[in-house]
Image: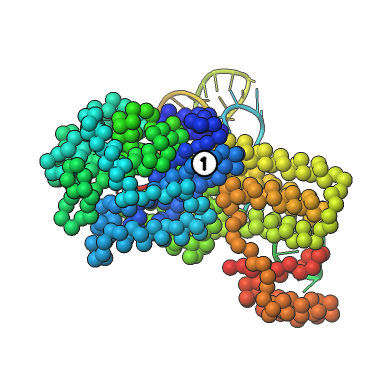
Amino acid sequence: MKIYNTLTRQKEEFVPIVPDEAKIYACGPTVYNFIHIGNARPICVFDVLRRYLEYRGMKVTFVQNFTDIDDKIIRRANEENTDYLTVSRRYIEEYKTDAEGLNVRPATVHPLATENIDEILNIISTLVEKGYAYPASNGDVYFRTLKDKGYGKLSHQPLDDLKSGARIAVGELKEDPMDFALWKGSKPGEPSWISPWGKGRPGWHIECSAMARRFLGITIDIHCGGQDLIFPHHENEIAQSECCNGVPFAHYWMHNGYINIDNKKMSKSLGNFFTVRDVAEKYGYEPIRYLMVSAHYRTPINYSVEVIEQCRSSLERLYNCRDNLEFLMQHSLAGEKEGEKAIRRRLEGYQDKFIVSMEDDLNTADALSSLFDLAKDINTSLNAETAPSKELCSFALNLFNELADVLGLLYAKKQDSADEEIERLIAERATARKEKNWAEADRIRDELKARHVVLEDTPQGVKWKIVE
RNA sequence: GGCGUCAUAGCCAAGUGGUAAGGCAAGGGUCUGCAAAACCCUCAUCCCCAGUCCGAAUCUGGGUGACGCCUCCA
């Protein structure tokens, strides 16, 4: 598989450290609020990465942290007159609700910054010993950026330009403006932990270095996150980890593009963001997931109501295909027929094409088109007229589900049975139809529709489904 | 200022040298008692200009426009 590596700015063949195993670290959310749809993108996209690698037979260890101590969490807690723990634990739960709604599988490990203070302190200590970090008199410990010769290699920024943007904030005691905090000395009223440099709390960047090392080792295969994390967060992670461990931190760096609103970056500071929860309540979760895989992960996506509605309509086509196929299979006969082998081979061709797309830096948009091509072929060659065997139906259904599952789509629970009232109405309508009492039949159909039950008359009988 | 991204039909979106995938929407048709679903048909020459090439949406140069990072942010 080829992966675009931010480090080298080109697509590279993915070669894992251990054959058939992938160690992946993804920067998770800071849990001080509901996640917005911008947050949903890396979550969905890198879930697809994981699913695809596993689909190809790799053993994937996927670590995604929760930043559960940070300025914004503390501020939020103060606003609500509560503590950071209450805030962070609440939004971790809300995150899980949204992640499940988006069909994102839980990571192998979801470590918390506050539960890895020891590892954080270990790394800081090593950095101080090696001269890459220094404690200041205010209790802060800073990373000595100028000592790291590789600094800037991920963001590809000339050091001089980084310097010009760097600032020393009020209260900081840095040797150089580019230095950044590994440890923040305790301030009154803030949560703190004991360290060799006095009470304090970890800086933002160090936690990822610590959790990556603890759960994945000193060198990992893939590190991923949003493009806006390239600098300073990921640049700083590299500096910390590599200066501490003396080996490359991550072989591949993957960064997803933004979700824009009206062609503007959606951000907390601009306040133009939609939470996943808000969108899901109106349109459901799955159109959001569809939106994320409908474009290549590195291109920007412009969110709008029109687009999310289109996503929903597109999903309907896929669901219809599967529903029709399942219905057909229930009414099919066992015994593979002449010529069905050729159909199998043709259907497998879509799978091949799907894989080729995914191999090319996770081209989900192109892969998705193969799924639609497969749907079209199934609709055309497996239907009431062609009366395929149960075996062929089953084969096609499995293939279809398999590919959809790599993208994490088509996960809505199916309504398995209608209640008695609905069954009765359907039977009554059948009688009316037999008597050619169309007015009555249509009346019942309308009544059911009002109850969100949509009927289809097929050669094998009445098919129904529940709609929103 | 430094670094970088993008510009393909009404909308979304693939395609990185060989003559424009896929989806949504729209129009016409088949099927249906009528529907629904499905199927068939119709629907772009790829922001502009110049260049390289037998051949360019794809490469080069120059424009125009939109956006991002350099500061908390997926």
Q: Which residue is mark 1?
A: A60
Nearer to me, A134 or A459? A134
Q: Residue furthest right?
A: A338
> Label 1 marks which chain's residue?
A
Q: How many marks?
A: 1
Residue type at mark 1 is Val
Nearer to me, A49 or B35? A49
Q: Residue at x 81, y 65 (%)?
A: A460
Residue A276, x across and y down, in percent: 44, 58
Residue A427: quadrant of the picture = bottom right
Q: Residue at x 41, y 61 (%)?
A: A94
- The 10 Å Cα crowd at callout 1, few under 14, some 14 to 19, many 20 or more, is some
Taking the image as shown, residue A31 lies to the left or right of residue A105, namely left
Residue A404, x across and y down, in percent: 62, 50
Taking the image as shown, residue A382 lies to the left or right of residue A170, namely right
Nearer to me, A55 or A425? A55
Q: Is residue A374 visible from the viewing direction of this image? A: yes
Q: Residue at x 59, y 46 (%)?
A: A406
Q: Name the quadrant of the N terminus of chain A.
A: top right
Residue A127, x across and y down, in percent: 25, 33
Q: Secondary structure at mark 1?
A: strand
Q: Residue at x 72, y 41 (%)?
A: A348
Residue B52, x across and y down, in percent: 54, 18
Q: Name the quadrant of the C terminus of chain A.
A: bottom right
